[in-house]
Image: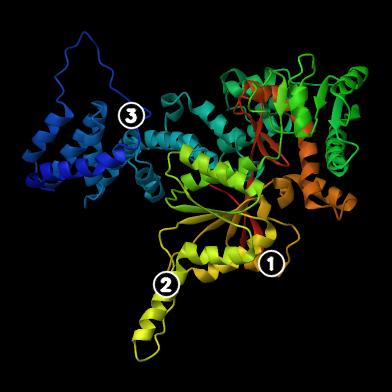
């Protein structure tokens, strides 16, 4: 870069970047280490970044680039973020490797300060932290871990934080480190914790062990305290309790719900009796595993007054249920309902939650929101949502769209279908292969000899989210595969648990190769529940999949009792259940984070996303 090119380059960069910067607020980097100066000692006047930039013309080649590195640092201090962005964007193309390395942290800060999300993701994907200068590495890792955490990329955040811990004086530089690490460790699934355990260092193994024992004994303060004491003996060099994250300390000291008698209100008669029985079996299995069986089952198909009387007579201290939405809505608004209750359906949005009212439902909305978050994290720009024309599927489509736009993205392309013929026509129109075929035909008619050419498909679509049942999905995926031209990039297709069936044979799975979907751990047979799954299969070998899901819901409902108070006080606390990673939001509703799975090489395989 020569001095004559400096000003034009800066103005071109600033002009080109202003549009993208306008998408989000210009804000300071997440951390900034400023020099500490003494008021008693006069300091030489520091030139502004703009003044330093004017002097860059006095230097040539590498010396000029070194001066620009200093200028970019000062621009960040001056909060002149567009100048910092323009300089660092140019320096990243330097032919001098040390300049590129010194520029890496500055470029990261400039992207963060100007909200350049796409550029930021590309930087993180293409940067090997081993190439970051030693003096910058700790801050670089800290900023990355914060970014991953803000994007809900918990596994990536944990990997980065555990790498940061190995840097000299990292814990002194970032006293918030333990709390951020615990926040992200708490959000991981059991399988993700196991992934981190491979070849783990001493400190990493200690943190993972603490995360595992905290969720294993959540709601059991005596067992948790004993487990923590054992952990402290195994890892004596780790901090004592008073120096561990506040979340760990509160988990140990906060008294959970420990009811001796639990009333379960379900529709034990009428058309919903099979659903109630599946829930009942799950609750009984969980109570048996915990060694507590003081359960009283009450039929919800009676008046609220009669239900209250039976709960009082049973001397219950906690209530699970009811299940049906109209009963949940009416009972949750009673002023004389005096029991902490885990309702088995969604909360009425028109009313505020009461302090000891909790709501647990197998909401499909959670899956749609989770998919929108994944698409945003993968920086998809033009996804398409295709749903069957059913009420549930259309509601999921609306939830995905709302979450997608809430994450700062433009409106998504949406389509619906109600038959196989509509689906086939939709795919042809969507990928524009029908127009391509027409063009090939038209050209062929104008030529004396037959034209051999394959139709081309659209290239601007970068992902598809399909919301359909298993039969519709098995029609859709192969048709997409043959409709995308061979020269086009692979088009990733995602689906929800509505597309999954455990009854697929090898041929069906082959047709679904490449499909990624969300599903509850229980239906994937994850290792954490494998023993219970075997016992269940022996007792209910032919049970309908919908009832299998309700069994898992009942099991989690009982297990959740002991963790609800902790989750209410500590929003980062996650309960690892059969139905997913369960969090409690601020209106008392359980939010599920499901597992990921994909069909690869004619087999269903677990997947770590994002």
- CA separation in Å, label 2 and label 3: 46 Å
Q: Is residue 512 visible?
A: no
Q: Is residue 484 above or below residue 581?
A: below
> Could you tell me which secondary element the residue under label 3 belongs to?
loop
Q: Nearer the viewer, mark 1 or mark 3?
A: 1
Residue 494: percent from left, percent from top: 57, 55
Residue at 66 percent across and 46 percent down: it is 392
Which residue is disc 1 drawn over?
508
Mark seen at residue 308: none
Q: Which residue is mark 2?
A: 436
Closer-to-camera residue (16/385): 385
- The answer to whether any part of residue 519 appears in the image is yes
Q: Residue at x 84, y 23 (%)?
A: 304
Is disc 2 surrounded by few (<14), some (14 to 19) or many (20+) residues within 10 Å? some
N-term mark: 2 or 3? 3
Asked whether, in this view, residue 497 is left or right of residue 485, the answer is right
> Residue 579 in the image: x percent, y percent?
71, 41
Q: Residues under labels 2 and 1: Cα distance? A: 30 Å
Residue drawn 63% across and 49% down? 393
Name which quarter of the figure residue 365 lies in.
top right
Residue farthest to the top, as pictured: 40
Q: Nearer the viewer, mark 2 or mark 3?
A: 2
Q: Are marks 1 and 3 in contact (CB under 8 Å)?
A: no
> Given contact means CB atoms under 8 Å apart, are the residues at marks 2 and 1 in contact?
no
Disc number placed over residue 27 in the picture, else none: 3
């Amino acid at each position: 870069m020569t001095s004559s090119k400096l000003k034009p380059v800066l103005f071109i960069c600033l002009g080109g970047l202003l549009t993208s910067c306008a998408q989000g607020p210009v804000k300071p980097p997440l951390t900034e280490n400023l020099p500490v100066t003494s008021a008693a000692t006069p300091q030489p006047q520091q030139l502004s970044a703009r003044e330093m930039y004017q002097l860059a013309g006095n230097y040539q080649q590498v010396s000029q680039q070194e001066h620009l590195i200093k200028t970019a640092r000062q621009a960040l201090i001056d909060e002149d973020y567009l100048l910092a962005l323009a300089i660092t964007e140019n320096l990243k193309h330097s032919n001098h490797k040390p300049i590129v390395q010194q520029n890496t942290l500055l470029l990261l800060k400039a992207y963060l300060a100007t909200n350049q999300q796409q550029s930021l993701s590309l930087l993180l994907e293409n940067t090997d932290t081993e190439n970051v200068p030693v003096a910058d590495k700790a801050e670089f890792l800290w900023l990355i871990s914060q970014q991953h955490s803000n994007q809900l990329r918990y596994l990536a955040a944990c990997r980065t934080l555990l790498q940061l811990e190995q840097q000299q004086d990292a814990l002194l530089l970032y006293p918030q480190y333990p709390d951020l690490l615990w926040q992200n460790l708490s959000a991981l699934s059991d399988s993700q914790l196991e992934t981190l355990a491979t070849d783990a260092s001493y400190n990493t193994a200690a943190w993972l062990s603490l995360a595992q024992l905290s969720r294993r004994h959540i709601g059991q303060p005596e067992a948790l305290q004993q487990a923590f004491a054992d952990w402290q003996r195994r890892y004596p060099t780790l901090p004592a309790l008073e120096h561990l994250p506040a979340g760990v300390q509160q988990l140990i000291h906060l008294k959970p719900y420990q009811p001796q008698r639990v009333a379960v209100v379900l529709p034990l008669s009428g058309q919903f009796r099979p659903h109630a029985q599946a829930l009942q079996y799950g609750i009984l299995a969980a109570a048996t595993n915990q060694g507590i069986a003081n359960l009283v089952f009450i039929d919800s198909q009676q008046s609220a007054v009669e239900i209250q009387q039976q709960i009082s007579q049973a001397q219950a201290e906690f209530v699970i249920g009811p299940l049906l939405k109209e009963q949940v809505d009416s009972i949750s608004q009673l002023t004389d309902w005096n029991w902490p209750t885990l309702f088995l359906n969604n909360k009425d949005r028109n009313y505020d939650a009461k302090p000891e009212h909790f709501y647990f439902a197998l909401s499909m909305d959670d899956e749609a929101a989770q998919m929108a978050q994944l698409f945003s994290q993968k920086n998809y720009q033009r996804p398409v949502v295709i749903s069957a024309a059913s009420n549930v599927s259309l509601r999921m489509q609306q939830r995905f769209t709302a979450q997608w736009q809430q994450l700062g993205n433009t409106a998504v392309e949406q389509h619906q279908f109600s038959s196989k013929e509509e689906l086939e026509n939709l795919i042809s129109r969507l990928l524009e292969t029908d127009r391509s075929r027409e063009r090939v035909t038209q050209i062929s008619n104008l030529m004396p000899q037959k034209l051999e050419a394959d139709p081309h498909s659209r290239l601007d679509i970068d992902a598809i989210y399909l919301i359909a049942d298993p039969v519709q999905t098995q029609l859709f995926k192969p048709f997409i595969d043959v409709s995308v031209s061979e020269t086009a990039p692979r088009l990733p297709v995602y689906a929800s648990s509505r597309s999954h069936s455990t009854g697929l044979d090898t041929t069906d799975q082959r047709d679904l190769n490449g499909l990624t979907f969300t599903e509850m751990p229980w239906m994937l047979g994850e290792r954490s529940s494998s023993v219970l799954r075997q016992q269940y299969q022996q007792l209910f070998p032919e049970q309908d999949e919908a009832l299998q899901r309700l069994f898992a819901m009942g099991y989690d409902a009982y297990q959740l009792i002991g963790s609800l108070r902790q989750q209410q006080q500590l929003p980062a606390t996650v309960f690892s259940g059969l139905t997913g990673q369960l969090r409690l939001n601020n209106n008392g509703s359980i939010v599920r984070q499901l597992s990921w799975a994909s069909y690869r090489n004619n087999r269903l395989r677990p997947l770590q996303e994002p």
